[in-house]
Image: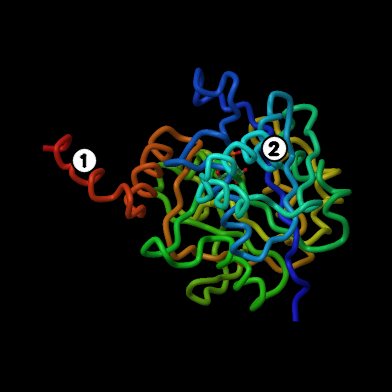
């Protein structure tokens, strides 16, 4: 029996420079996919995987994230008085329970590894999940388990540390962390190496680290000591590689679709894909798309 995964860290301190000017005053995590902020989709995924406590590592100009996961008294009161109970109930269903969110700040943009390390006191001494909000996932056929639930299943089987991976064309591996494949069990496999942003042509495989992790707390001490790596930042991948010398790491191939919403194309595609899953939007959107595409 593995220790249950109760806490998830969501690093949301990034500046969102790829989406300027949209992200000048709005955090990139609050951009919409259909009618839910990207970050809400990610929290939905974490909840479905059994996560109870959400740790947001924020930064300056991110205060609206905290507001989004709190009650909004005036709005809720008005919705109730106007009889808009469907909208009111939907907001209430999304609200995390009292005391089940934590917010801490990454004071300087020193990298993903540093962001996770900033949450060390809140995580404590238990295994935890990490979800990178640039990535949103959709289960197979739109209804299957999303990525973190599949990682938790892999963790229940293998224990140790789990990294979700995704296949990309070889021409894209230099933009991501990449793993090397050891003993392969099909959907999961032993990770025999990992590297952050390998120069073109040097990646050990075309399986990238796709932004969902289950990690043992020992990685936190390591992250406090790792040297700056790719891009001059403290990289989570470098911390994990060091831990891999002492603990097991398995890759989990996600059965479903991942959208990299940190890229314009991924963001736009995610909007269309999620809208096509919505019975209230799907028929008219499909007709519009057909018209546009000729
Ligand atoms: C981060 C991770 C990288 C991972 C990627 C997924 O990179 O360091 O290993 O593949 O997220 O989006 P970043 O996007 O912060 O450059």
Query: Where is the C terminus found, in terms of image quarters?
Result: top left
SS of the residue at dot 1?
A: helix
Q: Residue at (54%, 71%) from the top-left corner?
A: 188
- Residue at image mark 1: 289
Q: Position of residue 293 (x, y in %)?
A: 16, 37
**Which residue is at 23% across, 44% downward?**
284
Is residue 113 shown left or right of residue 137?
right
- Residue 255, quarter of the rendered image: bottom left
Whichever of labels 1 and 2 marks the residue nearer the N terminus, that label is 2
Residue, x 20% and y 39% (percent of image)? Answer: 288
Label 1 CA crowd tier, 10 Å (few <14, some 14–19, many 20+): few
Marks 1 & 2, CB-CB < 8 Å contact = no
| Residue 50: x %, y % from top left | 66, 66
Q: Is residue 193 above or below residue 79?
A: below
Frontmost residue, 27 versus 221: 27
- Give how far across and how far down residue 21 sits, in percent: 50, 18
Residue for badge 2: 73
Decide if ligand 1 comes within 8 Å of the CB at mark 2. no
Residue at 16% across, 42% down = 290
Q: Nearer the viewer, mark 1 or mark 2?
A: 2
- Name the side, left or right, on which 228 lies relative to 35: right
């Amino acid at each position: 029996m593995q220790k249950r995964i109760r806490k998830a860290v969501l690093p949301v301190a990034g500046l969102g420079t790829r989406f300027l000017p949209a992200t000048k005053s709005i955090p990139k995590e609050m951009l919409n996919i259909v009618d839910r902020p990207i970050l809400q989709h990610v929290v939905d995924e974490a909840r479905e995987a059994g996560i109870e406590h959400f740790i947001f590592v924020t930064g300056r100009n991110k205060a609206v994230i905290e507001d989004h996961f709190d009650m909004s008294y005036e709005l809720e009161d008005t919705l109730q008085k106007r009889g808009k109970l469907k909208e009111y109930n939907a907001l209430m269903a999304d609200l995390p329970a009292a005391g089940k969110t934590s917010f801490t700040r990454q004071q300087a943009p020193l990298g993903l590894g540093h962001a996770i390390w900033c949450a060390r006191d809140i995580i404590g001494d238990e295994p935890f999940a990490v979800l990178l909000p640039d990535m949103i996932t959709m289960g197979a056929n739109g209804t299957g388990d999303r990525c973190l639930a599949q990682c938790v299943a892999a963790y229940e089987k293998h224990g140790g540390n789990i990294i979700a991976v995704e296949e990309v064309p070889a021409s894209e591996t230099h933009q991501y962390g990449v793993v090397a494949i050891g003993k392969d069990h099909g959907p999961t496999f032993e990770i025999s190496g990992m590297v952050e942003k390998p120069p073109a042509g040097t990646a050990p495989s075309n399986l990238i680290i796709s932004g969902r992790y289950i990690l043992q707390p020992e990685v936190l001490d390591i992250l406090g000591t790792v040297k700056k790596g790719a891009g001059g930042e403290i990289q989570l991948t470098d911390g994990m590689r060091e831990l891999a010398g002492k603990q097991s790491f398995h890759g989990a191939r996600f059965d479903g679709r991942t959208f990299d919403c940190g890229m314009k194309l991924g963001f736009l595609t995610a909007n269309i894909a999620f809208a096509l899953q919505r019975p209230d939007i799907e028929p008219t959107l499909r007709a519009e798309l057909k018209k546009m595409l000729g």
